[in-house]
Amino acid sequence: MTVYATPDRNAAGVRVIRAAGGLMCIKCRLVPGDDVDHAHFRAEGIPAMLDHLDFHTVLGDYVPPEAFVRLRAEYADLFERGAL
């Protein structure tokens, strides 16, 4: 599991991880429904997660800059390897 942002590590207002091959925003307040504890956003890819995190920042949630930098670097690495 890779952790990009979490309240415990970098005072983030979101919890973003890569687990089981997918990027997830855990306990996401942007997912519709009443049960926030089980509301997770699963991104189809890095660009989708970057867009999702942009929405969090617009709503005032703190997303550490290093989360964006790390996700963009991983995306660039994938692109250079020809996986896209």
Image (cartoon, grey):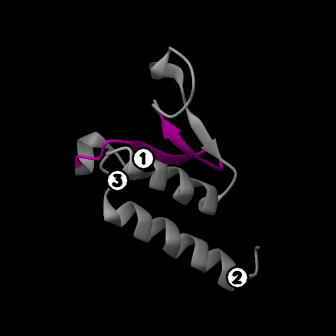
Residue plotted at (70% across, 82% down): 81
* Image side of residue 32 versus residue 15, left or right: right
- Identify which residue, 33 or 46, lies in the foreground: 33
Location of residue 20 by image quarter: top right
Which residue is identified by label 3?
A: 63
Residue plotted at (55% across, 30% down): 31
- What is the number of callouts on the image? 3
Residue plotted at (31% across, 58% down): 64
Which residue is identified by label 1?
A: 56
Q: Position of residue 73 (x, y in %)?
A: 50, 75
Task: Give the extent of the magenta segment.
Answer: 11-26
Q: Is residue 53 above or below residue 41?
A: below
Q: Identity of the amino acid at label 2?
A: Arg
Q: Identity of the amino acid at label 3?
A: Val
Q: Identity of the amino acid at label 1?
A: His
Which residue is identified by label 2?
A: 81
